[in-house]
Amino acid sequence: MRKKKEIREKILETNRVRKIAFAGLIIGVSLTFLGLTLFTPLFVVGFTMLVICTGAASFLTAVKWGYSKALKMEVEKKVVTHTKVCPRCTTQIREGLRYCPNCGKKIQAKKH
């Protein structure tokens, strides 16, 4: 439970920083267009800001995706109680599936 809360907090923090990066992206685009029409140094500043903020926004999006995936895995740990392992690819398979969702190998049902 504590781990899920920590991951959620990291996602929220990443979202806040992403918003700043996207705002910088918008400002960079605006300065770039102003620089093209009015004042050339604005173009240089705007384009530099555009490149940096694009990289930051992309990186933070990837970080958020990683945290979201970790949160999903943490939740799934609690949900899946009965699993089998595929003999071909060693993927964990939920009870009741006839085929491995990863490689498609037919899974033998346990005989009671």
Image (cartoon, rainbow, N blue to C red):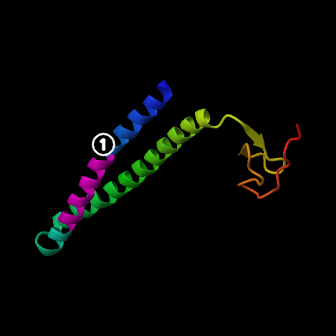
- Element carrying mark 1: helix
**Residue 81, picture quadrant:** top right
Instruction: Name the spot of residue 47 as percent of width and height, x first.
Output: 27, 64
* Residue 102: quarter of image: bottom right
Given residues 60 and 65, the one toward you in this image is 65
Q: Is residue 99 left or right of residue 43?
A: right
Q: Is residue 29 magenta?
A: yes
In percent of width and height, residue 20 lies at 26, 48
Q: Is 48 located above or below residue 77 in the figure? A: below
Residue picked out by circle 1: 16
Q: What residue lies at 10% left-to-right and 72% top-to-bottom?
A: 38
Position of 17 with respect to 59 (left or right) is left
At 18% from the left and 73% from the top, the residue drawn is 36
Residue 14 lies left or right of residue 77; in this view the side is: left
**Position of residue 48 measured from the top left corner of the image (x, y, whole percent):** 28, 60
Mark 1 crowdedness (10 Å alpha carbons): few <14, some 14-19, many ≥20: few
Percent x, y for residue 53? 31, 55
Q: Nearer the viewer, residue 55 or 12?
A: 12
83 shown above or below 29: above
Using the rendered view, name the quadrant where residue 9 is placed. Answer: top left
The magenta-colored residue range is: 18-32
Q: Residue at x 29, y 60 (%)?
A: 50
Residue farthest along the top direction in this orientation: 2
